[in-house]
Image (tube, rainbow, N blue to C red):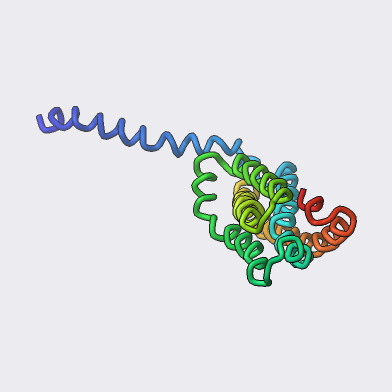
Amino acid sequence: MGGEAGEPTGHPHRAAATLAVRPWQRRQQRMPQALERADGSWAWVVLLATMVTQGLTLGFPTCIGIFFTELQWEFQASNSETSWFPSILTAVLHMAGPLCSILVGRFGCRVTVMLGGVLASLGMVASSFSHNLSQLYFTAGFITGLGMCFSFQSSITVLGFYFVRRRVLANALASMGVSLGITLWPLLSRYLLENLGWRGTFL
């Protein structure tokens, strides 16, 4: 009697539990069996892409000083006014992590990285048409910083899906991308600045 009375109320609870699990299952399916083929050949392609992404996202903020004098002269701004641009970029790059984690959980690392690349590119292109520092703050500072955050954070997260036994090695190699970016970005930026100006370089 007690079993029969409890049975009707048991089914809805089990159904609700099943429905509650399904979104997580769908999110797991967005990573195409990455863990099943962890440490495989495709994992090293992902690692290479992560190195490039980290070099681009963390290397660029270190070379902004090259453009500092040009930006000051262009906008007739003080040191403190001009320095807000790299400050906003760096702050958004590191503070938008929680938002990035929401996007990764909802859409996966691949989509979030691509979204970050689009935002960072749009921000830099738009900044090349800036007429005042406020526009530069928003385009190259906020939009580009947000895009770099999405790309950087997602590229770190995705390594955990593709590496298991060699995860420590993968993270160590990925961090080399930052060193390469910090080394190469200033050289490239100086060359482009001398030949194209800061607007052409940002574009």
Measured from the top left, where is residue 93 in percent x and y? 60, 58
In the current view of this chain or complex, which residue is farthest to the bottom? Answer: 79
Q: Residue placed at 66% from the left, 60% from the top?
A: 168
Q: Residue placed at 25% from the left, 30% from the top?
A: 12
Measured from the top left, where is residue 69 in percent x and y? 77, 67
Q: Residue placed at 19% from the left, 27% from the top?
A: 8
Residue 24 vertical placement versus 92 (above, below): above
In the current view of this chain or complex, which residue is farthest to the front? Answer: 76
Measured from the top left, where is residue 24 in percent x and y? 45, 39
Quarter holding residue 84 = bottom right
In the current view of this chain or complex, which residue is farthest to the left? Answer: 1
Please give left or right for residue 97 compared with residue 167 in the image.
left
Residue 101 appears in the rendering? yes
Quarter holding residue 37 = top right
91 vs 25, nearest the viewer: 91
3 vs 198, nearest the viewer: 198
Residue 200 vertical placement versus 108 (above, below): below
Residue 165 appears in the rendering? no
Measured from the top left, where is residue 123 in percent x and y? 66, 48
71 vs 53, nearest the viewer: 71
Q: Residue placed at 64% from the left, 71% from the top?
A: 80
